[in-house]
Amino acid sequence: QVTLKESGPGILQPSQTLSLTCTFSGFSLSTYGMGVGWIRQPSGKGLEWLANIWWDDDKYYNPSLKNRLTISKDTSNNQAFLKITNVDTADTATYYCARITYWFAYWGQGTLVTVSS
Amino acid sequence: DIVMTQTPSSQAVSAGEKVTMSCKSSQSLLYSENKKNYLAWYQQKPGQSPKLLISWASTRESGVPDRFIGSGSGTDFTLTISSVQAEDLAVYYCEQYYDTPLTFGSGTKLEIK
């Protein structure tokens, strides 16, 4: 059974760095073809893909967030991480992690992040 | 970037009716080497995470009712629900995985009359 769960700070201030953790089970990020992606969704709005990391440590980012994103993984502890630097109110959203092969087959429950001064 | 355009933005139907929703991509999602369309459909019910319904444009995920039918190729795709049930109340998103950045459509909200 594949499960994923996101965790994050809940609330942070503009200009701070957002650190998110995805803890998963039921698959390994050392398995060929496996990946974890991050997607966000502002309240009442659509889905925006942020980044993927793959079993071979290959990484892909959404260029719309320029150089603010860093994705990483801890294979031995079944975790993936996303950092977003210099946040502002536009980064307020629910952040999801999901297992990806080609598509996002399994999603976490999401963690709400609010950026507010 | 590949732009995904979904229409309509919302639709209200009665239970038992057939509903279709469209997803168009700004470039072809058909990969010539394997003849596969790199398109997925997701269902997001109120207060829940998205759930994968269909991959490769027309392959239903295990456990997805057969009333959900994906079709289309190239740049034009359709999700059909053959007989809408009350539990199908949700927003439906298409997503292309042909190229990065991965992109989603803006969604079609299905309401039950």
Image (cartoon, coloured by chain):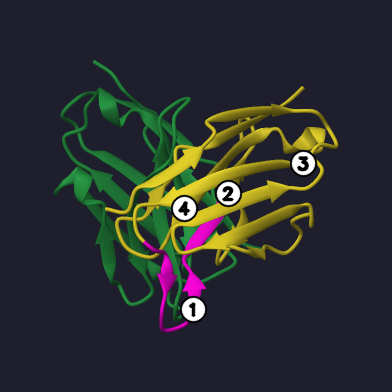
Chain colours: A green, B yellow
Instruction: Looking at the picture, tell me which residue is in the foreground, B29 or B76.
Output: B76
Q: Residues within 10 Å of mark 4 (few under 14, many from 20)?
A: many
Q: Are marks 4 and 2 in contact (CB under 8 Å)?
A: yes
Q: Which residue is mark 3?
A: B18
| Quadrant position of the C terminus of chain A in the picture | top left
Q: Residue visible at 20% across and 51% down?
A: A63
Q: Residue visible at 53% across and 44% down?
A: B93
Q: Is residue A17 magenta?
A: no
Q: Residue visible at 44% across and 81% down?
A: A32
Amino acid residing under circle 1? Lys
Q: Tell me: A28 left or right of A19.
A: right
Task: Compare marks 1 and 2 and give the one earlier in the sequence.
Answer: 1
Magenta region: B28-42
Tell me the mark number nearer the camera, choosing from 1 and 4: 1
Q: Which residue is mark 4?
A: B95
Task: Compare marks 3 and 4 and give the one earlier in the sequence.
Answer: 3
Q: Residue visible at 27% across and 53% down?
A: B1
Residue B49 % position (x, y): 57, 41
Q: What is the C-alpha distance between the residues marked 1 and 4?
A: 18 Å
Task: Compare marks 1 and 3 and give the one earlier in the sequence.
Answer: 3
The chain letter under disc 4 is B
Q: Which residue is mark 1?
A: B35
Residue A57 % position (x, y): 30, 72
Q: Is residue B31 magenta?
A: yes
Amino acid residing under circle 2? Tyr
